[in-house]
Image: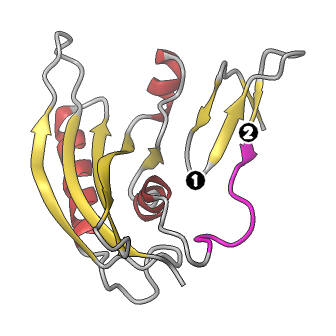
Amino acid sequence: MIAAFTGTGILANSTAYNTAAATGAGALTTVVTGAYPEPGEFPDWEHVLIDLLTPIAYTCQTLPPSAELLAEKLPLLWVQRNGGGLDFNAIIDTAQVRVIAMSHQRADSWRLARQAREAILTCPGAGSGVNGVRVDWCEEITGQLEIGDMDPLNRDVEISFRMMARRQL
């Protein structure tokens, strides 16, 4: 699959784009190889959220590089780890993550944000975890907030969470 991306980044489900110098088009390739999560390591929280939320809507950790490509992907959920760290004994990784719901309509963004909230808050202790990642605990830090913008058509809704996990087996 070839798309007209420029630069590099990760779109969804660890699918990366990288500009091919000869063609100017980015070939989509898979970044994650081998077993995930790696035994003995802490989870990649953005990857966990992409795996968890992709059934709800297109989910990415890096937005498409142009307004046109972004518009094609709407509605979407944009996930980012924006803080946190290990506890004193380096046993538990506590991540602060945010999820931004984007769509063409305000009501759709709010609906997506509610669905993401429900999925995230119910994932700790769930069976085999999120694609094999065991999440110990999570809580909502900031409820649904519509992000103000000069453009009245911009209907982004953000939610922040604190998520915890130990090293994965």
The residue shown at (28%, 68%) is: 88
Q: Is residue 113 left or right of residue 24?
A: left
- What count of labels does the image hold? 2
Quarter of the rendering containing residue 65: top right
Compare residues 5 and 164 and report the one nearer the observer: 164
Q: Is residue 29 above or below residue 129?
A: above
Relative image position of residue 109 (x, y in whole percent):
23, 40
- Quadrant where the C terminus sits is bottom right
Secondary-structure class at tag 2: loop
- Quadrant where the N terminus sits is top right
Which residue is the site of mark 2?
28
Magenta stretch, main secondary structure class = loop
Q: Is residue 31 left or right of residue 104?
A: right
The residues bearing labels 2 and 1 have C-alpha atoms spaced at a distance of 11 Å
Relative image position of residue 57 (x, y in whole percent):
41, 51
The residue shown at (20%, 38%) is: 157
Magenta stretch: includes residue 12 = no
Which residue is the site of mark 1?
13
Relative image position of residue 131 (x, y in whole percent):
52, 74
Compare residues 67 and 125 and report the one nearer the observer: 125
The residue shown at (42%, 58%) is: 45
The residue shown at (48%, 66%) is: 43
- Mark 2: few, some, or many residues within 10 Å (few <14, many ≥20)? some
Tag shown at residue 25: none
Q: Which residues are magenta?
A: 29-38
